[in-house]
Amino acid sequence: MRGEQHALIGILSAGLALAPWMETLAPELVLIAFGGIFLGSLAPDADSPDAAIMHGLRSRKGYFRRLKRHTAPILPVIGTFIRYFIYFPLSAILLVASIGKVRPHHRGVLHSLPGISLTTVTLTVYIWLTASIFGDPDPIPLAVFGAAFFAGCFLHLLADSTTRSGIAWLLPFSRRKLWGTVSPGSRLEKRPELLGAVLGASTFICLIAEPLLLVPETTVKMLSGLLAAGVWALFLVSAGVRIH
C-alpha cells in the first residue's frame, strides 16, 4: 500500500482506539501517541529507498497536502536513521546468522513481527540514550511512544497482509505468508479508502456517544474496542486473507 494509505489507516485506527480516553489523557501523551502511530505506520517501509518515510508523503490532495508540508522535513531524517542504524545492522546480523539465506529486501525483516519488535525496542533505546544526555528522561512518554510506534508498525503489516504480495509475519523463522486480494496500484481498488472511511465514522460515533447520546463511559470504551476489532476483521475478510 502507499504511504498515504498506511498513514491514514494508522491515524484513524488510533483515533478510534483513543476516542473514549481523549478527555482523561494528558494532551501531550495523546500527541505522542498519534505521533508514534504515524511514524510506526510508515517505518517498515524504510527498507525501500523510495518509500514515503524516506522522502515524505507524496499526495497533493486535501489534508495530506498539509500533512506533507509539515512532515516533509522530518520524515526523511527518521527514515534514514531507521534504515542505516536499525535496518542495515539487523539485516547484516541475519545475513551472517543465516549463512546468507536471509538477504535484505523490501518486505523482508522489517515486515515481520520479530523485525518490528526489535525496531521498536532499538529506536526507543536510542531516544532514551539521547534524552539522557539532557537529564533524567520521563519513562511514561517514552513508553507511550514505544507502544504507539509498535502499534503503527503492526497496523502497517496487517494492511500489507491484505495485498497480493503478502507478509511473512515470522520471518526469519518462517517464510509462510498472509496475503489477500487487495491491489493498491489499481485505480479500481477502493477497499483501503473504504476502511479509512469506516474507521473515521466509527471514531465520530465514539466521540459523540457519551456527551450527545448519553451512552455510559464504560460502554463507549467497550464499543471502541469492539468497533476497531470488527472493522479490521471485516476488512481482512473482504480481502480474502489466507496463509500460503
Image (tube, helix red, strand yellow):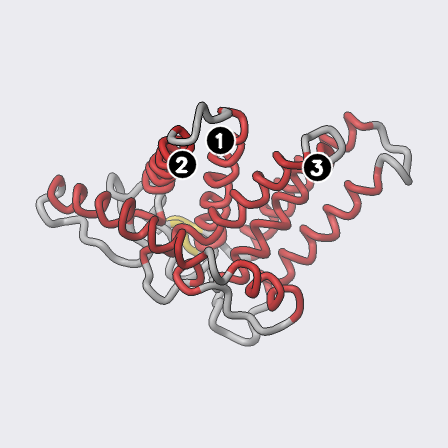
Which badge, 3 or 1, is on the more N-terminal residue?
Answer: 1
Query: What type is the residue that disc 2 sits on?
Result: Ile
* Mark-to-mark CA distance, 2 and 1: 8 Å
Kindly report which numbered mark, 2 or 3, lies closer to the viewer in this rendering: 2
| Mark 2 closeness class: few <14, some 14–19, many ≥20 residues within 10 Å | some
Q: Position of residue 30 (x, y in %)?
A: 64, 38
Q: Residue furthest bottom?
A: 187
Q: Position of residue 197 (x, y in %)?
A: 69, 58
| Mark 3 closeness class: few <14, some 14–19, many ≥20 residues within 10 Å | many
Which residue is label 3 attached to?
A: 224
Q: Regarding mark 2 in the picture, which secondary structure is present there?
A: helix
| Mark 1 closeness class: few <14, some 14–19, many ≥20 residues within 10 Å | some
Query: What type is the residue that disc 3 sits on?
Result: Ser
- Number of the label disc, if any, that sits on residue 142: 1
Query: What type is the residue that disc 1 sits on?
Result: Leu
Q: Which residue is at a point 30% across and 58% down the rendered structure image?
A: 106
Q: Regarding mark 1 in the picture, which secondary structure is present there?
A: helix
Which residue is label 2 attached to?
A: 127
The answer to which quarter of the image holds residue 15 is: top right
Labels 2 & 1 near each other (Cβ < 8 A): yes
Depth check: give the residue in front, 35 or 192.
35
Horizontal arrangement in the rendering, residue 37 relative to residue 175 (left or right)? right
Horizontal arrangement in the rendering, residue 155 relative to residue 201 (left or right)? left
Q: Which residue is at a point 47% across and 35% down the rendered structure image?
A: 146
